[in-house]
Image: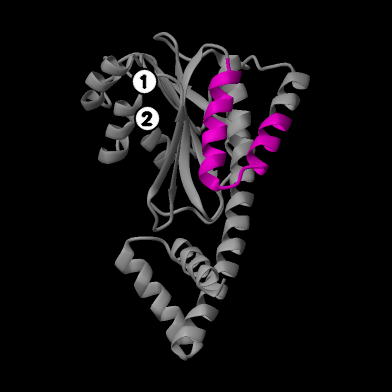
Amino acid sequence: MSAPKRRVPAAQRGARLARRTPKNGTSSLSSPRRGARHTAPVAPVAGPHPVELAGLLHEVTVRLLTADSLHQALDRLAAFVTATLPGVVRCSVTLIGEGGPLTAAASGPAGETFDQLQYAGSTGPAMEAARTRSVVIAGDLLSDERWPELAGAAGADGLRAVAAIPLDVRRTAVGAVSLYPDRAGEVDPEVLVTAMALAGQAEVLLGELHRREALTEGAEVDRAVGVIIAQRGCGVQEAYAVLQESAQRLGLDRGTVATRLVAAAARNSS
């Protein structure tokens, strides 16, 4: 799945979302169709107190921006959502980078089997939210007709309902923040609005963390290339090629191999 060039943050998209209810009683949220002549008015959704929401956005900003890595930031986001939002017993966060593997984190009791099946089959509420860039809600995972292959795992993991909110990290990745309430039925509207605001803030913060990681990785790669040149007496282009070939052979990303190479060189020189 490729990351889009430019998307609107989830919190802003929430203002334009309209509800539709399938025959099975579940629902999803999506943007109204273009060209529709008549659109029924959408009732306003209750939201958290502005002061409370401002505090939550500040807290999630501090937690994510002080993370040492993108994966730690996802762990912190999942833990924060689970601990903060009432009635939410589990939160899963999924990111799919352009040309890269899926990155996931979760907080809460059992739910690993359900998540793993989603990711392995590229199906389920989180995957649909990532693909469609819309909020996907299932009030009863045990009888939802959209993903019957996940019903058994949901029952075994004790999951009854879910609301998956899209994540769109600009030019980097797409994904979803999935909320699992403690009972069947739709997520409380106030909780959903708060979660959408947190997801919108997280999109910006994760984009900044990815930018920082790219800068750090670039510097480490340059140092590793210098080590290869010193060891082999080769040119710059050949050194980059050697580093890339080593990464492919080891099944690791280039930044990880570069870090290990620089550390090994430092140990040998001491």
Residue furthest out toward the right = 51
Inspect this view and state whether residue 98 appears. Answer: yes
**Residue receiving disc 2:** 125
Residue beneath the point at 35% across and 74% down: 245
* Residue 204 falls in image quadrant: top right
Q: Are marks 2 and 1 in contact (CB under 8 Å)?
A: no
Question: Residue 168 at x, y = what percent?
Answer: 53, 44
Inspect this view and state whether residue 42 appears. Answer: no
Q: For the residue carrying disc 2, how many other residues have a C-alpha within 10 Å: few (<14), some (14-19), or many (20+)?
A: many
| Front label number (2 vs 1) | 1
- Residue 45 in magenta stretch: no
Q: Above or below — where is 43 with respect to 221?
A: above
Nearest to N terminus: mark 2 or mark 1: 1
103 to the left or right of 115? right
Residue type at mark 2 is: Pro
Give the alpha-carbon distance from disc 2 to disc 1, as whole Å. 17 Å
